[in-house]
Amino acid sequence: MDKIIFYTFLVFKLIIELSIFSIIPIILISIINKLFNKKISVNFQYILYIFILVRLILPIMPKSSLSLYNKLEILNKSNHKNNIVYMMKNEYNFKSYDSSLNYYKEIKNENFKQPKYISFLHIISNSHSYIKYLFILWYIGLSTLIVCNTIKYIKFCKKIKCIKQIDNPEVVTILLECKEFLKIKSKFKLIELDFINSPAIFGFKNPVILIPKGLLTEIKKEDIKNIFLHELCHYKRKDIYILYLAKIICILYWFNPLIWYTVDKLKKTLELSCDEMVLSYINTEEKLSYGHTIINLLAYSKNNSKIYMPLNMVGNKKEITKRVLFIRNFKKKSLCITILSLISVLLIGGIMLTECNKTVSAAIDKDISSNYIIDEKGRIRKIENTNISFTKDDKVIGKWISVDFVKNVKEFNPNKRNCKDDLYLKNLEFFQNGKTNIKIWNWSKDLIIDFCDKTVSKYYIKNINNDEYMFLQWKSGDYILRNRTPEYYVLKKVK
């Protein structure tokens, strides 16, 4: 049970991170679709919404210099996502950390007592109150939605399993003709239900076309053909997979109204995109008939308000009005517009579906072994292997005085101080035996070992204008908790 809660808590942290990261893509795509609504294909607009789903469901994306997040410094610095994924994927080999169900807690004193271990349940109970209650609230909502949707799905499957397939020869012939027209080889079960308000398609491996009971006797042959073309296009495009993915995302992110809004927009765009596909197959005269079919279905559904299916051919009056106008004004996009739209979508995908090219764990300290843990406050933090044997470095022995604090080594100018504030680290003295004047720090060649914070920092020595300067990585809370790149203390050697 403890292990289940551990991984559930990590999923919760990951969901929060991805929620933050999804804000910019959602706003960006909403603006693009609004501005270029009539200039780009509805199908490409639909693909852009799919990009958001992919962004929300996949914790790891390829790194690229094109990534949107290269320019978003705040998000880059606060990103724990890679840390969380690391914890979920890897077993901990760190000697001071027994298992993924325990956390490391260092007693900060001069005697360096051994770490204490307690269960992950204790971490939850001792976390900041808002983290604890948010996790509990999210978990209750998630569990409720999973149970309710699973029960509904099982009940629905049982109902349609017992219903006899439609054997009307004329209707079956129309279905076969539509399948042949769209070059679909799969077999479909065709059934009538008295508890749905619109034609729909259901299922993955053994698809079922669902027809409201009594509808076939009230509509014309052309309407039946248009219904089958629409539902078969949904099947051919694999829209059911996208809708189930959207459903999973809505359950995971049930607390986020922006994501629910995005999924709603995706569903509406999906139907327009399916209409676009149908219209691309039929001739001009048949387009008018297709529009009339949708209007007729709206009238039928208004008089038969029942269960709404995920892939429902009919929506509300406002949606139908938009679709009818779309059908009336539909024109195939020129080759030039299609190519430009494709290039734009690929470019947006490259921007959205990639991550910051600079990764702290990959770019810094490649030879330093590090792990992520959850501390007693429920925070994900980094610890590093401090079990390093002593290697002497004669150049570093002696006293060093702090003279500046810089973001990177290139920023330092010995004639102009970069940091205007008082320096926290005043001086540092290195002794022959690997000790320093700071009791919780030891040193080995090129490294400073902090046994209290469990970090290992590199130092670099440069000769500038005949003076020896040391650039020492400063691994503060920004590095440990927020995964920021360490900045540097600059120290000058006392002659």
Image (tube, rainbow, N blue to C red):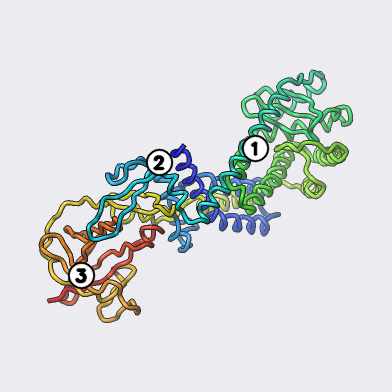
Residue 89: image tag: 2
Q: Position of residue 316 (x, y in %)?
A: 80, 46
Q: Which mark is first along the chain, 1 or 3?
A: 1
Q: Tell me the quadrant of the picture where the C terminus can be found.
A: bottom left
Q: 213 above or below 442?
A: above
Count of labels in the image: 3
Direction from residue 38 to residue 485 in the image, left or right:
left
Q: Is residue 307 above or below residue 379?
A: above
Q: Nearer the viewer, residue 295 or 17?
A: 17
Say which mark, if any, is on residue 428: 3
Q: Around disc 3, counting alpha carbons within 10 Å, would you say few (fewer than 14), some (14 to 19), or many (20 or more)?
A: some
Crowding near the residue tagged with mark 1, few <14, some 14–19, many ≥20 C-alpha atoms within 10 Å: many
Identify the element where label 3 is drawn: strand
Q: Percent from the top left, x then y, of residue 112?
A: 24, 56
Residue drawn at x 43%, y 54% is: 377
Element carrying mark 2: helix
Return the mark for residue 412: none
Depth-wise, is mark 3 or mark 1 nearer the camera?
3
